[in-house]
Image: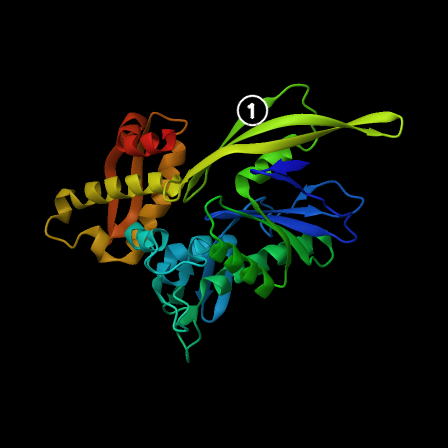
């Protein structure tokens, strides 16, 4: 398929001699697709038989935790888990996307890399062995661990060893951020054949097997966990003569794209986190106690987990009673309900940003 953005770039994919994977590297989840000769396109399932895996990394007693195991650890010991690793690649601690993590009640420590690169460095408190309890690593190393887990899932699923990969990246990734993703893949033992924008990958999948008799224009709206990307594509076909026959091929070009790096599903979760934190602190028996936002990282982890559940329930229900056992100071959070109308009212500024 020909990609035009803004000049014509013809992507030539050689016939694969061995299996390769495509990894959709999201901020909160990743998915892996396996392509190998003689077999149809397959989505790799993880050890829990799920088609998507949490982009989470945890450390406990010097051992790594991935996916669902890291998610469980993040609920128990929030400081020992790293979330949103792709958002940190190639960025400094002062980058808005990195600095914004501190406002989202994610307790892992971020500092400037000691090598003078100007990029962020991560510290997990209490995740290492007894003789070195803190774990310090770069975003590339953290992302490499996630990609290593993705590769191991693919190896197990395919019954072989995977070396080559195509990775998705957001539209707004800079050259430095793309290079950091490549570095992470190299550390993970993967050879990157290509980095492809997420929306372009969606357009390619849509158009790869279609022939368009007339110009077809499509908008791809992609709201992930941490960002929103929108692209407009134009699909057409062209015909070439091969011998005595004509052969028609599809092609597309990007007409325009836009994004908001800090508008994603997690922004909606935070609206609910703030609502629940205020409601909990307003309870009669909470008078005079330390606000839940300042009390413990574990309490805020429970609120983040509950917010994700409430958001999903309100997608299909008009009202939901919130209950969180032993949220803070051995006190349960009960007696508060939220309606879908209230949630939409709270999120009006986010909807307006998405429309923009």
Q: Position of residue 251 (x, y in %)?
A: 66, 31
Q: Is residue 166 left or right of residue 135?
A: right
Asked if one can make out residue 355 in the rendered structure from this viewpoint, the answer is: yes
Please identify the quadrant where the C terminus is shown. top left
Q: Residue furthest right?
A: 244
Asked which colour scheme the image uses, the reply is rainbow
Asked if one can make out residue 230 in the rendered structure from this viewpoint, the answer is: no
Which residue sits at x=43%, y=53%? 87
Q: Position of residue 241 (x, y in %)?
A: 82, 28
Viewer-side residue, 145 vs 257 = 257
Viewer-side residue, 35 vs 93 = 93
Q: Position of residue 206 (x, y in %)?
A: 62, 31
Q: Position of residue 92 (x, y in %)?
A: 37, 60
Q: Residues within 10 Å of mark 1 (few under 14, many from 20)?
A: some
Which residue sits at x=59%, y=44%? 51
Q: Is residue 252 left or right of residue 321?
A: right
Which residue sits at x=42%, y=70%? 136
SS assignment at label 1: strand
Q: Where is mark 1, residue-wise?
A: 217
Q: Residue furthest top?
A: 214
- Kindly indicate the quadrant of the structure image that contains residue 159: bottom right
Q: Is residue 50 left or right of residue 256?
A: right
Which residue sits at x=13%, y=43%? 284
Q: Residue furthest left?
A: 288
Q: Residue furthest front?
A: 7
Please identify the quadrant where the N terminus is shown. top right
């Amino acid at each position: 398929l020909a990609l035009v953005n803004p000049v014509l770039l013809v992507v030539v994919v050689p016939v694969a001699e061995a299996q390769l994977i495509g990894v959709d590297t999201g901020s909160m989840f990743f998915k892996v697709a396996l392509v190998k000769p003689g077999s149809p396109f397959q989505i790799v399932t993880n050890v829990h038989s799920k088609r998507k895996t949490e982009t989470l990394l945890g450390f406990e007693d010097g051992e790594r935790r991935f996916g669902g195991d890291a998610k469980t650890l993040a609920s128990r010991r929030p400081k020992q888990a790293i979330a949103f690793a792709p958002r940190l690649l190639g960025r400094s601690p002062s980058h808005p996307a990195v600095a914004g993590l501190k406002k989202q009640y994610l307790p892992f420590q971020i500092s400037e890399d000691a090598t003078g690169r100007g990029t962020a460095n991560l510290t997990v408190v209490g995740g290492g062995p007894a003789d070195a309890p803190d774990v310090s690593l770069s975003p590339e190393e953290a992302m490499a661990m996630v990609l290593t887990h993705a590769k191991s899932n693919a190896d197990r699923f395919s019954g072989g060893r995977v070396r080559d990969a195509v990775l998705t990246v957001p539209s707004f990734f800079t050259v430095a951020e793309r290079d950091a993703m490549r570095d992470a893949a190299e550390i993970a033992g993967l050879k990157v054949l290509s980095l492809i924008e997420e929306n372009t990958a969606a357009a390619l999948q849509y158009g790869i097997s279609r022939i368009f008799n007339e110009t077809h224009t499509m908008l791809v709206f992609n709201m992930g966990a941490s960002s929103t990307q929108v692209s407009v594509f134009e699909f057409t076909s062209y015909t070439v003569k091969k011998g005595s026959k004509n052969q028609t091929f599809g092609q597309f070009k990007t007409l325009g794209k836009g994004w908001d790096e800090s508008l994603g599903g997690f922004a909606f979760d935070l609206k609910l986190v703030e609502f629940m934190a205020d409601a909990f602190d307003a309870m009669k028996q909470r008078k005079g106690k330390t606000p839940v936002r300042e009390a413990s990282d574990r309490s805020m982890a429970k609120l983040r987990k509950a917010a994700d559940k409430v958001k999903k329930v309100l997608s299909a229900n008009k009202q939901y009673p919130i209950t969180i056992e032993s949220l803070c100071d051995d006190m349960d959070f009960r007696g508060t309900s939220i309606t879908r109308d209230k949630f939409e009212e709270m999120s009006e500024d986010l909807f307006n940003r998405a429309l923009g």
